[in-house]
Amino acid sequence: MRVSLIVDHPYRDLPGAVLLALRLCKSGVTCYLVPFNKREREVWHLAPDFVLLNYLRKNIQEFAKQLVEANIQIGVMDTEGIWANWDHYELTLPEDTDLRNKVKGFFTWGPQLAEIAEQRCWYSKKQITVTGSPRFDLYKNPWNRASKQFSLYANEYPKPMVLISSKAGLANPQFSTPESIINAADRTYGFKRDEYIERQNIQKATMSQLIQLANSLASSFPEVTFVYRPHPFENIRGYDGMIQNDNLHVIKYGDISGWILRASAVIQRNCSTAIDATLGGVPALSPRWIESWPLLESAEAMSVPCDSENILVKTLRSIINGEFDVPQEVKNKQKTVIDKWFHKVDGNSHRRVSDKIIEMLSKSQTSPKRSLCKEHAYGLHENFIGTRRNVAKVARHLRLSLNLPTQLSFSKFKTVKPIGFTDRYTEKKFSLSDVENLVEPLISSSLINETSALDPVEVSTVKEKDLIAPYQSESIVIAPSNVT
């Protein structure tokens, strides 16, 4: 059995995906970690039995439809399981109900999304499973031990450390431009253009005020290390020249759990990092005087409200001095949010997802149409455009008939990167060593008790035997080990 796991952004999604892959391997499944922005070329060359998508939205509906046509089962584990507005979520979904009906499993973070998905007929009750998200398992024993081990880079920043988390991906995007985001929201998803422009403007103001607050706090607490972490989809260059203190660092690196588990406090405004902090046992503070929109009520409910900078400074000082306890009112709200939006926060979400995927694979009576996958791998089903479209079409058919590398350029007679693969996606890449650095701590931490124990695995780049056509794959394989 072969499963492809789509990884959107390695800083946020890779550790949880690796943990899920390790659990699947225990059941004999070979897993392929596939970069989101390379998903189509990678998956067609791999021709797996099952693909776990990081979401199913309009921008990838054609790809999902083609997977179904090729007899490749698809499941959905949305990377964003909490939304401020369900109407906005619905706008992102494919209008093709037949496609959604063919999704084998829709895995949700908690009961709230599951209930809404069924009520609004996005998915049927049979398709929906409340599992929790594997990425949040990293805050619970034994996986929190592993999280600290594979984030040793954070030890370079002395304690006490305060993490300040930003969320300005619309105003300060890494992988697009502010204008292209507006266009995509309007044309692809049907959002109101004026609403998104307003949202961008508010994010610009929020970003500016939050970095000002960071500088002010760094001055007030010279003995504290402040780490300002932009959202994974933010451009770190947007903060050039804004840092005024030696104890304030803008760092966009590594999984968020490693930073949170070392922090004394997390400061954020309307960001889901407040939820991560709470799950990690770290108080989250919300500077309420900073404007933010749209309001993510779940994140705010998890946070200790601070209505002024003076209140925040006073609260932070009590935390640093070890004198702070989260108010009971906030604790009550936190429990309500966790019960509503999350499943059992017990470190076993990856196990529940794995068990369901294994169940789906065991019931499957079909196998991938390898010939169709091969045609997709050679690009025969892509739209041919431009004055040389006939030449391009002939070239692709020739590569297929001669079983040549799908990336082979006849004009240069060497393999080349496909058109559209630009350097702006460099941050979304992950390497063999990136995955190996996660695997060893996770396996060693799992051996604390028999129920969590994971088996040895083989981690490698994709080999020729894994592919249906010659290709330089960028996916990483995690497979059951031959070691007994």
Image (tube, rainbow, N blue to C red):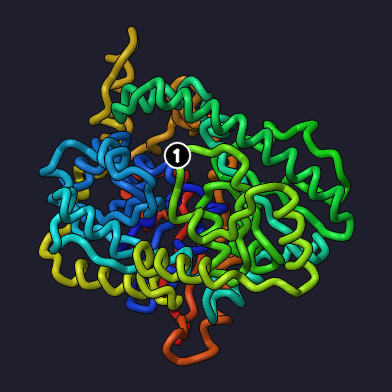
Image quadrant assignment for residue 477: bottom left
- Dot 1 amino acid type: Pro
Question: Which residue reaches farthest bottom?
Answer: 450
How crowded pointer 1 is (Cα within 10 Å; few <14, some 14-19, many 20+) is rated as few
Q: Is residue 8 left or right of residue 115?
A: right
Q: Which residue corresponds to the image point at 80% horizontal and 39% vertical from the top-left?
A: 243
Q: Quadrant of the C terminus?
A: bottom left
Observer-nearest residue: 310 or 294? 310
Q: Secondary structure at mark 1?
A: loop
Image quadrant assignment for residue 285: bottom right
Q: Quadrant of the N terminus?
A: bottom left
Q: Which residue corresponds to the image point at 46% horizontal and 81% vertical from the top-left?
A: 454
Q: Which residue corresponds to the image point at 45% horizontal and 62% vertical from the top-left?
A: 17
Question: Dot 1 corresponds to which residue?
Answer: 294
Image quadrant assignment for residue 25: bottom left
Image position, residue 183 (x, y; %): 40, 21
Q: Which residue corresponds to the image point at 24% horizontal and 36% vertical from the top-left?
A: 62
Image position, residue 74 (x, y; %): 24, 54
